[in-house]
Amino acid sequence: MDRNEMKNYIAKRVANMLHDGDVVNLGIGLPTKVSNYLPEGANIFLQSENGFIGLGPVPQEGQEDFRITNAGGQCVTILPGGVFFDSSTSFGIIRGGHVDMTVLGALQVDEKGNLANWMIPGKMVPGMGGAMDLVTGAKKVTIAMEHTAKGAKKILKECTLPLTAAGQVDYIVTEMGLMEVTKEGIVLREINPEYTVEQVQEATEAKLIIADDLKEMQV
């Protein structure tokens, strides 16, 4: 798979984790692709911390409305029945525990469920934005990311970058597999059939626990 195929593959698997009635926050970058693959017929309410519920698919090129953007400044669509509100209401929803899942990218995740996903001011993403609130306020935290970055491992024994939150990650979805963070460590629950367990472990610094009922990824 090329990088774009990898990102779509990851987004499809995350989309299949969502359930009818869920309120879901999608972070910037790869997680926004999840909106293109929501389960057919399910009423899933996508939220953006800058003040929307009811986000639709990523707009087609040339059909963007530059007045409607998510928290990362990317153009989005709004479905019928979608609502707009101010930041205080948006963060009341997040901090009040009303978000069922947040889907975020990451620079690093470790076996304790620690997350590092913000960059140095002046770079592409100047700081952590609403991520600190999201990972502590959402009921479930799913990391959607490529397994490595230019060959560097991103799933570690211990994060080396400044943390966004400690012990908050529940699931990690990459092009190689779906992993669950548990008290015992990171459990590989599903694997992309294009890879072997040995290849997934080789690309992962943390020692993976292989589920007894390891399945192919459900995309």
Image (cartoon, helix red, strand yellow):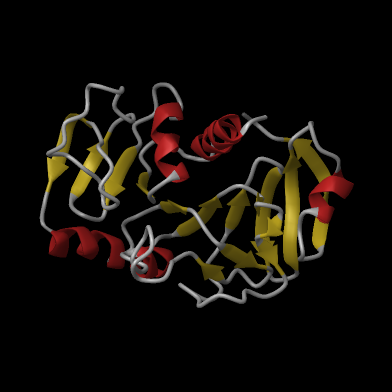
**Residue 210 seen in the current view:** no
Tell which residue pokes out farthest to the front in this image.
122
Residue 169: x %, y % from top left: 55, 63
Quick one: 1 or 174, which is closer to the camera?
A: 1
Q: Quick check: 164 above or below 150? A: below
- Residue at 33% across, 66% down: 126
Residue 65: x %, y % from top left: 16, 31
- Residue at 33% across, 63% down: 97
Which quarter of the figure has residue 78? top left
Q: Quick check: 149 above or below 74? A: below
Q: Quick check: 171 above or below 135? A: above
Instruction: Locate residue 6 relative to residue 89 in the image: left or right.
Output: right
- Residue at 39% across, 34% down: 35
Which quarter of the figure has residue 153? bottom right
Instruction: Locate residue 211 relative to residue 67 in the image: left or right.
Output: right
Residue 134: x %, y % from top left: 37, 63
**Residue 144 seen in the current view:** yes
